[in-house]
Amino acid sequence: MGEAFEPRVVAFCCRYCAYSAADLAGSMRLEYSPNVRIVKLMCTGKVDTLHLLKAFEDGADAVFVAGCEEGDCHFLEGNLRAKRRVKQAKKLLGEVGIEPERLEMFNISASDAPLFAAAVNEMTERARRLGPNPLRKEAEKVA
């Protein structure tokens, strides 16, 4: 029998809020799943639907976008654009047979390290429950 499944989680985080919360979580020594890989963005409004889908194509088992609180984006409406793109990507994932719940959007303030840790743990557990991304085997064959 092979080794136990450990999900790969990718987090697209805005520099001002979610990434600061991740940094604070580390400073506070909060425990959260080590399965997450963070992609730091100036604003979640810069994340494109293609970036989200490419993360799955490259073998991520779960992906989340974490930005500023709604109405509190440093770039005015960037997090609202990201929310629409996440919704669009979820629809596309469903159309190609990948569970849309593998993708989520979170709004996390810079001071809310516990919420960042909870988001990471939630997405890791979600990926564990759903099992490996069906595209992961294909990505591993290519690599």
Image: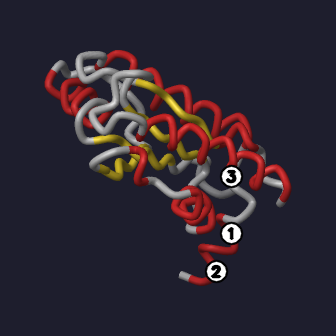
Q: Which residue is mark 2?
A: 141
CB contact under 8 Å: marks 1 and 2: yes
Q: Which residue is mark 3?
A: 132
Residue that lies at the very extreme toward the front in this rendered image: 76
Residue 14 location in percent, x, y? 32, 41
* Depicted 69 relative to depicted 100: above or below: above
From the viewer's perspective, is 48 left or right of 69?
right
Alpha carbon distance from label 3 to label 2: 14 Å
CB contact under 8 Å: marks 1 and 3: yes
Callout 1: SS: helix
Q: Residues within 10 Å of mark 3 (few under 14, many from 20)?
A: some
Residue at image position (41%, 41%) is 78
Hey, what amino acid is under mark 3? Pro
Callout 3: SS: loop
Q: Which residue is mark 1?
A: 137
Residue 143 location in percent, x, y? 53, 81
Hey, what amino acid is under mark 2? Lys
Q: Residues within 10 Å of mark 1 (few under 14, many from 20)?
A: some
Residue 26 location in percent, x, y? 20, 29
Callout 2: SS: helix
Residue at image position (56%, 68%) is 58
Picture colour scheme: secondary structure
Residue at image position (20%, 32%) is 23
Q: Residues within 10 Å of mark 2 (few under 14, many from 20)?
A: few
Hey, what amino acid is under mark 1? Lys
